[in-house]
Image (cartoon, rainbow, N blue to C red):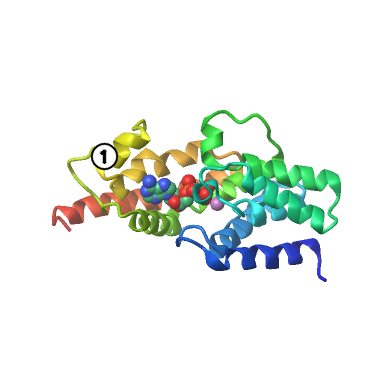
Amino acid sequence: MGTLIETTTTFVRDTFASAEEGGHDWFHTRRVLKNAITIGQDEGNVDMIAVQLGALLHDIADSKFHDGNEAIGPETARDWLVSQGADQALTTHVVNIVRHVSFKKNLEGQQWTSRELAVVQDADRLDALGAIGIARAFSFGGHKGHFLYDPSVPPNPHATKEERKRSGAPTLNHFPEKLFLLQDLMNTDTGRKLAAERTAFAHEFYDRFLAEWEGEL
Ligand code: ADP
Ligand code: NI
């Protein structure tokens, strides 16, 4: 028996042993944990235990891979923490972090928040930016069978799921449609600063991709 952080780390790593694609796996969670520790320490005045547990458990059961069932992640987190005899208030807080961390729910208007959620959410978004974010986007696109790029499909952040499917959802469009918008959604000063650096790098990649596409570099 180790600390709750240690046993949770082992639980999450074991759960991800059969990850379904390269963007969501134990190493994504590990990066989010590290980002969250960096941001949490820099911000100060946050419960670092809740931050670490929230980061560890935030993608424990992604609804995308469970027929859109959004309850399964929070439920899995709660079952785990209860099985470990975790403090009740801490358990409730972490379950709320897991429930509210996703990008989609944020767009729909977030009803619950905490300083710790703000940190974990920023840490998760950072992993969609920079070199890692670029790698994850193309891994996701490859997993789905999307094209790298199609000049006949203009980026459209408001495209419906159906429109996106019909257009072949070229992965490069994910940059202006989502990735470049993330920096404006950051909650913390530290998150904003790190996101700005990673977004600048993603812009550089995007511009260079288009130049190389035309044989201009
Ligand atoms: P998370 O579960 O980490 O909150 P998502 O499930 O929305 O985030 O996305 C996981 C990763 O896959 C991110 O790096 C995101 O940029 C990428 N991704 C999501 N949708 C697409 C898409 N349509 N094309 C390319 N990459 C995508
Ligand atoms: Ni995540």
Count of residue discs: 1
Q: Quadrant of the C terminus?
A: bottom left
The reply, left or right, for residue 127 in relation to residue 86 is left
Task: Name the residue: 52% across, 42% down.
Answer: 68
The reply, left or right, for residue 142 in relation to residue 20 is left
Q: Is residue 111 above or below residue 17?
A: above
Q: Quadrant of residue 32?
A: bottom right
In the depicted view, which residue is nearer to us: 111 or 117?
111
- Coordinates of residue 44 in the picture (x, y in percent): 73, 47
- Coordinates of residue 125 in the picture (x, y in percent): 52, 47
Residue of label 1? 166
Q: Is residue 106 above or below residue 75?
A: above
Task: Name the residue: 82% across, 71% down.
Answer: 1
- Coordinates of residue 81 in the picture (x, y in percent): 77, 54
Residue lying farthest to the front in this orientation: 67
In the depicted view, which residue is nearer to us: 31 or 26?
26
Can you tell me whether the CB of the residue at mark 1 lies under 8 Å from the nearest atom of ligand 1? no
The amino acid type found where label 1 is placed reads Arg
Task: Name the residue: 71% across, 38% down.
Answer: 114
Q: Quadrant of residue 213?
A: bottom left
Residue lying farthest to the bottom in this orientation: 1
In the depicted view, which residue is nearer to us: 57 or 189?
57
The secondary structure type at the circle numbered 1 is helix
Does residue 198 appear anywhere in the picture? no
Task: Name the residue: 50% across, 51% down.
Answer: 65
- Coordinates of residue 207 in the picture (x, y in percent): 27, 49
The reply, left or right, for residue 159 in relation to residue 11 is left
Does residue 28 appear anywhere in the picture? yes
Q: Is residue 21 above or below residue 69?
A: below
